[in-house]
């Protein structure tokens, strides 16, 4: 049986109990830092990158569906998602080095 892609809406992410995200751990401080990081990091993306991330990860659309919705090609969507992921990854590395949070502490 193929694994289903779980749709995660930003507003529901903010209300999830810590144990649902951290697999039973109730680390509210870590959860708050990650929520804050996510919001601030998304704000640093270009509007188009942010929109593609929101549609792909938070609304569960496929690249083809995003391309149709936005009136662009699938390769453009894929490139924008890849660029946004690289930016978010770099921001996570900076945050971890600065001691804002430990990205490897999440189970």
Image (cartoon, helix red, strand yellow):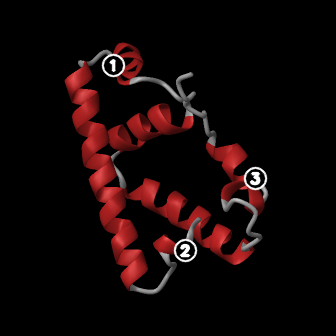
Residue corresponding to mark 1: 67
Residue located 39% across and 22% down the image: 66
Q: Nearer the viewer, mark 1 or mark 2?
A: 2
- Spatial separation of the CA atoms under disc 3 and disc 2: 18 Å
* Disc ID at residue 105: 2
Q: Is residue 54 left or right of residue 8?
A: left
Residue 63's place in the image compared with 34, above or below, is above
Name the spot of residue 10 as percent of width and height, x first: 62, 45
Crowding around mark 2 (Cα neighbors within 10 Å: few <14, some 14 to 19, many 20+) is few
Residue 62's place in the image compared with 39, above or below, is above
Query: Which corner quadrant of the image does residue 17 belong to?
Result: bottom right
- Spatial separation of the CA atoms under disc 1 and disc 2: 35 Å
Extreme residue in the front direction: 1
- Spatial separation of the CA atoms under disc 3 and disc 1: 30 Å
The reply to whether dot 3 and dot 2 touch (C-beta < 8 Å) is no
Q: Nearer the viewer, residue 23 or 9?
A: 23
Q: Earlier in the sequence, mark 3 or mark 2?
A: 3
Name the spot of residue 60 as percent of width and height, x first: 53, 29
Q: Earlier in the sequence, mark 3 or mark 1?
A: 3
Crowding around mark 3 (Cα neighbors within 10 Å: few <14, some 14 to 19, many 20+) is few
Query: Which corner quadrant of the image does residue 92 belong to?
Result: bottom left
Q: Earlier in the sequence, mark 1 or mark 2?
A: 1
Residue corresponding to mark 3: 16
Name the spot of residue 51 as percent of width and height, x first: 42, 37
Query: Which corner quadrant of the image does residue 74 belong to?
Result: top left
Residue located 66% across and 69% down the image: 32
């Amino acid at each position: 049986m193929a694994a289903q892609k779980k749709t995660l809406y930003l507003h529901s992410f903010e209300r999830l109990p810590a144990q649902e995200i951290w697999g039973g751990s109730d680390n509210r401080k870590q959860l708050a830092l990650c929520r804050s990081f996510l919001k601030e990091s998304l704000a640093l993306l270009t509007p188009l990158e942010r929109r593609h991330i929101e549609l792909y990860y938070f609304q569960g659309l496929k690249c083809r569906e995003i391309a149709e919705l936005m009136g662009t090609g699938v390769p453009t969507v894929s490139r924008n998602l890849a660029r946004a992921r690289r930016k978010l990854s770099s921001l996570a590395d900076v945050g971890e080095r600065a001691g804002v949070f430990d990205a490897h502490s999440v189970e």
